Image (cartoon, rainbow, N blue to C red):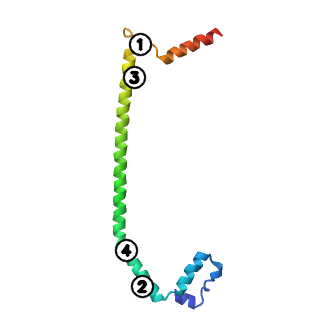
Amino acid sequence: ASNVVESGIFSPINADLIDSPDRAVLAQLRQSDSTTAHDALQKRLQNVSANLEFSIDCFAENVHALSTSRSTAESLAERNLKEAAEVLESRENSRRAAGAVNGVPQPSAMDALRGLARALNGRR
């Protein structure tokens, strides 16, 4: 890459045309000795590659744990909703049975209010 710049195909980077943070990076790159930069880069890549497998394993384990927790929560929620629906249905059946006189179901409070509203509206 340095041969390309030296041969004149590309012009050198004009630091005045780039943002301040990029200027600082450019200055750092220009100041560093190429062997030092190469050694630092090599060390950094070795550290990343040494920790990469462990990081990926941790990530995969956490994704699996999250998936397991989600499926457990879903099954618990479904079971709780089913039990709640059964309890509500049982209560409703008990109320209906208690409201029946001689096997004839009695009107609910809402039915009574509707009938009263019709009667009052009919008088007008």
The mark that comes first in sequence, 2 or 1, is 2
Measured as percent of width and height from the top left, residue 46 is found at: 37, 78
The mark that comes first in sequence, 2 or 4, is 2
For badge 4, the amino acid type reads: Ser
Q: SS at mark 2?
A: helix
Label 2 crowd bin: few (<14), some (14–19), many (20+), radius 10 Å:
few
For badge 3, the amino acid type reads: Glu
User: Eyeballing the image, is 107 above or below 58?
Assistant: above
Q: For the residues marked 4 and 1, what is the alpha-carbon distance in whole angstroms? A: 76 Å
Measured as percent of width and height from the top left, residue 73 is found at: 36, 45
Label 3 crowd bin: few (<14), some (14–19), many (20+), radius 10 Å:
few
Toward which corner of the image does residue 79 lie, by quadrant? Answer: top left
Residue at left offset 34%, top offset 69%: 53
The mark that comes first in sequence, 3 or 4, is 4
Measured as percent of width and height from the top left, residue 72 is found at: 34, 46
User: Eyeballing the image, is 14 above or below 84?
Assistant: below
Asked if marks 3 and 4 touch (Cβ < 8 Å), the reply is no
Q: Which residue is mark 4?
A: 49
In the rendering, which numbered label is found on residue 92? 3
Q: Which residue is mark 1?
A: 105
Residue at left offset 50%, top offset 86%: 32
Q: Which residue is mark 2?
A: 39
The mark that comes first in sequence, 2 or 3, is 2
